[in-house]
Image (cartoon, grey):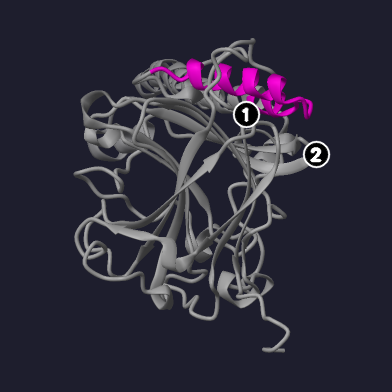
Amino acid sequence: LIHLLLSSSFNVPMNYLRTTTLLCSLVAVPLCTAFTISSISSTRILTHGNSLRAENNEEENDVPGDLDSVLSSARAVVNEATVGIPTTTISRTPPKEDNKAMAFLRKMGKVGGAANKNFVNAVGADEGAVGKVAPATGGGMAGLKKAKAAYQECTTTGIIDDLTESFPLTSSGTQWRGISDRIMGGLSNGIIQRHENIQGRVCNLLTGTVSLANNGGFIQMATDLSLDPSKSLTVDASEYEGIELDVLCNLEGDSATTKSAAQSYNVHLRSSECLQQQSSYRYTFTLEKEKEWVTIKIPFSDFVGHGPGASDLPLNVGALKRIGIVAIGREMEVFLSVSGLRFYKKTRTQGEL
């Protein structure tokens, strides 16, 4: 290009042209090569960083059904996530060569990093005094791994999640996400993980620490209920009587003498009547036995409204938006497993049949 411009515009002698073109080439080629190598190196560093965390997560999830081992693993993951340092940047082993097949499986949520959701620095304060929380990232129809027709809305089947889909998807086509008090200045942290075997069951495990510092005090795992928010943000559960969930906890403390006698958690429902982010309908359940699966059955009539809108009106089960399982209100070490979440219908008596 230089050769043509000079020869046509300025009648520069041919020997000079050849010398000028050669010098430009000698400078331009190394610069372009250096830029390309730098870009490739940066991409591989980022790829290795994300893959490393995914591989570490895969190892952390590959734990036996022994609850003490699971608890130790979960504590290590939560403790590792310090304030201001995203856990994807923390590594414990040298980077491994990128494996395209494994990377694809991780992206699809079949193995590794997609089986964990760390929300130490999560945005969202729907149980606090201020702030707003956006819909789940990638939620709704955009996040589905299967065709829309393959899913049925939770109110059609009665099942919110039976843990048959790859995390973070629910079996009704929505997504789990973690929400903490950090956006309002709190210091609570936590992580949601999928485990294949805790006391014989596949489950979502919520672990972390609730702190009351700075007016905080909660962590939760939550999911929207509507399968297709573009059509409706709510679901109609009026044909059901309440919520049923299968849970297991590990009581606080390190020994039989220091463990608490019981541990309390909340189930929160949000409906169209909830006017602010802290508004919800709440029910507190208490678990007195550890390392044992129990089924909690909660009638809709037992949920109590909190916050603007909810405190003034009864729960409208015909317009439910979201459900959350929450550790809230006191300083605590959280270890709560959930293996099933669903609506239940009223049991008919012999005279009603």
Magenta span main SS: helix
Residue found at x 65% / y 22%: 56
Residue 238 location, x and y as percent? 48, 79
First in sequence: mark 1 or mark 2? Answer: 1
Residue 298 location, x and y as percent? 52, 60
Examine the image and state in which quarter residue 254 appears: top right
Residue 119 location, x and y as percent? 43, 34
In this rendering, is residue 205 above or below 28? below
- Secondary structure under the numbered disc 1 in the rendered image: helix
Residue at numbered disc 1? 54
Dots 1 and 2: beta carbons under 8 Å?
no
Specify start and end residues of the magenta stretch as a single range.
57-82
* Closer to the camera in the image, 274 or 60: 274
Residue at numbered disc 2? 200
Q: Is residue 62 magenta?
A: yes
Residue found at x 70% / y 42%: 293
Q: Amino acid at mark 1?
A: Ala
Residue found at x 44% / y 43%: 326
Q: How dense is the environment of label 1, judged by Cα within 10 Å: few (below 14), some, or many (20 and up)?
A: many
Where, quadrant-wise, is the C terminus in this rendering? bottom right
Tally of numbered tags? 2
Q: How dense is the environment of label 2, judged by Cα within 10 Å: few (below 14), some, or many (20 and up)?
A: few
Q: Amino acid at mark 2?
A: Gly
Question: In the displayed structure, does residue 120 sit left or right of residue 274?
Answer: right
Question: In the displayed structure, does residue 133 sit left or right of residue 259?
Answer: left
Task: Evaluate whether residue 233 shows in this view.
Answer: no
Task: Evaluate whether residue 136 shows in this view.
Answer: yes
